[in-house]
Image (cartoon, rainbow, N blue to C red):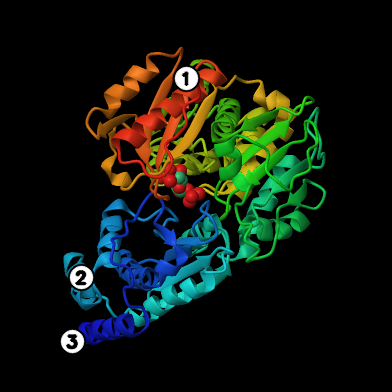
């Protein structure tokens, strides 16, 4: 009875305040729902409702983040965060899609179906839902819609205001571990990361060719806003020179800057001074991705993307692990976008096992959990390291026992501190930056020495606009195109024309486009292959607008 009353209120609210305004269906994609902000109010309200059901079902705190991350400013989006700070479980993504698309008049029934299917009995629990948002002008009203959904379903919204996506994931984890993971506050987040960073760095801020200054592109988003606090807390240990920190609503979010721009265009962002050999980094619109880069003496751009960060971290962890003498296995997870040279380097030089999974940190995160220490990164700079709880316990116990040599003890202590620099819940640009800086400092490397590990194969990312991106389906971790029939044969034929070449296509889960990736022996061949594959996609998968131009 109480349930029915509750659901009637939910429906009345939906009808009066958040009616479904869009007829076409929306899909829970790579990282939640993303589209024009003006089309999202009812989706947000409904995700508030669903978050409460998820929290009641899991008997834990869950999170809702309002962001469209790397997308342009008119877009927005929402993703749900599960109790350990990980992305929403995939079986519930389907429920999210169903709830987002059902007609207003069917909403009550659809919610009731979930309550029955998952046997959610504690419908009066004031489940806590942690809510955060990025700096988009549309975020406050969309956040209000989420909060109204939470309240209508009888949950308790905890509004953290403007935070980075990884901060929100961290808060959820802290709350569900009874603060064992850290304090669920922004201050607690900075304190945990920075204390560990300072401990590992010690009193000497520079080392060898490493200098403690980094040029930071905040993408005019929350990553810029938050690094202001970080800068102060870091003191002299790391000097973060900040650029692209325009205020909310300037229209410049991710525009010609930020991690996605730098990675996809393979070029220097606007707004950052061009200083030869200076170590620069960019984050994206919600600060969960990070890439590094520099300009050499001749002004040539060099990118150190997620693959480079992953290899740097994996090599470093392997080295310390060896010093600890503790037998833990280490593995690395990538996607099809990983540069072939990085995969060769990891397997042949580092001798670390590599797994390849589909795009989306949700896939990488779970695969990484199969190792004692799992490093995962997408080439776009989205990634982190996860440690199996038993592995952490073994390290702690070994440190406390008195049978380690001084060198082993030092290495174990260092590794335990390094774990605290890392946000294990999800890729986190701020935490990843502190980790990269820690490793470069420890090696005494400048950015060129970091880059010297291996040489990337030239690669190119392209986007093709099609009427319906879902006509493209893939298999084998997105490396084979299954439909439209015949497209994969065409791609194979094109790839065969070039030396050391590889190409694949997949529908984006965050933008209404198809992504094309190509790699080949030279820049010219790569650009030609990418354009030819893009043209095939355009021709065979319903391309719209101007066809991609193929260089002659
Ligand atoms: C999201 C996901 C990433 C993914 C990216 C692009 O990142 O979290 O795992 O790589 O989208 O996905 P797609 O190629 O499907 O559009 P972000 O930073 O935009 O949240």
Instruction: Bin the neighbour count of mark 2 within 10 Å (Cα to Cα): few under 14, some 14-19, many 20 and up.
Output: some
- Locate residue 491 relative to residue 450 in the image: left or right: left
Q: Position of residue 124 (x, y in %)?
A: 30, 81
Name which of mark 2 and mark 1 comes first in the sequence. 2
Which mark lies nearer to you, 2 or 3? 2
- Residue ID for mark 1: 347
Residue 110, numbered label: 2
Q: Position of residue 416 (x, y in %)?
A: 59, 42
Mark 1–mark 3 distance (CA, rounded to whole Å):
60 Å
Where 181 sits versus 240, above or below?
below
Mark 2–mark 3 distance (CA, rounded to whole Å):
17 Å
Mark 2–mark 1 distance (CA, rounded to whole Å):
48 Å
Q: Quadrant of residue 293?
A: top right
Asked which secondary structure carries label 2, the reply is helix
Name which of mark 2 and mark 3 comes first in the sequence. 3
Name which of mark 1 and mark 3 comes first in the sequence. 3
- Locate residue 8 relative to residue 407 in the image: left or right: left
Asked which secondary structure carries label 1, the reply is helix
Residue at x 51%, y 53% (from the top left corner) = 71
- Residue ID for mark 3: 1
Q: Nearer the viewer, residue 165 or 118?
A: 165
Residue at x 24%, y 85% (from the top left corner) = 8
Q: In the rendered image, which quarter contains the N terminus?
A: bottom left
């Amino acid at each position: 009875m109480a349930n029915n009353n509750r659901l009637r209120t939910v429906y009345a609210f939906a009808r009066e305040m958040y009616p479904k305004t869009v007829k076409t269906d929306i899909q829970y994609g790579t990282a939640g729902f993303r589209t024009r902000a003006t089309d999202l109010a009812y989706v947000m309200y409904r995700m508030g409702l669903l978050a409460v059901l998820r929290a009641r079902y899991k008997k834990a705190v869950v999170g809702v983040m309002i962001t469209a991350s790397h997308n342009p400013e008119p877009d927005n989006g929402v993703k749900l965060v599960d109790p350990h700070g990980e992305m929403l479980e995939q079986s519930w993504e389907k429920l999210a899609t169903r709830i987002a698309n059902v007609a207003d008049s069917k909403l009550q029934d659809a919610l009731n179906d979930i309550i029955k299917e998952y046997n959610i009995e504690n419908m009066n629990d004031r489940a806590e839902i942690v809510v955060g948002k990025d700096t988009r002008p549309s975020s406050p009203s969309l956040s209000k819609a989420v909060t109204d959904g939470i309240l209508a379903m009888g949950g308790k919204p905890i509004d953290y205001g403007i935070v980075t996506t990884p901060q929100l994931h961290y808060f959820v984890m802290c709350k569900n571990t009874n603060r064992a993971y850290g304090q669920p506050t922004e201050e607690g987040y900075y304190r945990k990361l920075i204390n560990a960073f300072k401990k590992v760095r010690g009193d000497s801020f520079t080392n060898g060719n490493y200098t403690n200054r980094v040029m930071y592109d905040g993408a005019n988003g929350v990553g810029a806003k938050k690094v202001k606090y970080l800068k102060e807390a870091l003191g002299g240990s790391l000097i973060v020179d900040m650029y692209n920190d325009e205020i909310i609503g300037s229209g410049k979010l991710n525009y010609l800057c930020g991690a996605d721009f730098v990675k996809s265009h393979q070029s220097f962002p606007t707004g950052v001074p061009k200083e030869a050999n200076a170590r620069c980094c960019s984050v994206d619109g919600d600060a969960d991705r990070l890439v590094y880069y520099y300009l050499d003496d001749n002004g040539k751009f060099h990118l150190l993307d997620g693959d480079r960060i992953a290899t740097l971290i994996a090599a470093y962890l392997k080295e310390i692990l060896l010093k600890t003498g503790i037998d833990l296995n280490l593995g690395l997870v990538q996607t099809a976008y990983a540069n072939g040279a990085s995969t060769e380097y990891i397997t042949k030089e580092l001798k670390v096992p590599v797994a390849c999974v589909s795009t989306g940190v949700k896939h990488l995160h779970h695969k990484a959990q199969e190792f004692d220490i799992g490093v995962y990164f997408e080439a776009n700079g989205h990634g982190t390291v996860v440690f199996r709880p038993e592995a952490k316990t073994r390290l702690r116990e070994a440190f406390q026992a008195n049978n380690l040599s001084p060198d082993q003890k030092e290495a174990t202590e260092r590794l335990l501190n390094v774990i605290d620099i890392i946000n294990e819940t999800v890729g986190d640009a701020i935490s990843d930056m502190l980790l990269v800086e820690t490793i470069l400092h420890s090696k005494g490397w400048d950015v060129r020495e970091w880059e010297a590990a291996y040489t990337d194969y030239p690669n190119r990312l392209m986007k093709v606009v099609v009427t319906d991106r879902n006509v493209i389906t893939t298999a084998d971790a997105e490396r084979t195109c299954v439909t439209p029939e015949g497209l994969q044969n065409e791609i194979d034929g094109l790839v065969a024309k070039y030396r050391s070449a590889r190409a694949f296509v997949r529908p984006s889960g965050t933008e209404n486009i198809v992504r094309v990736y190509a790699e080949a022996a030279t820049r010219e061949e790569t650009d030609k292959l990418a354009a030819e594959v893009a043209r095939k996609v355009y021709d065979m998968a319903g391309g719209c607008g101007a066809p991609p131009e193929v260089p002659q």
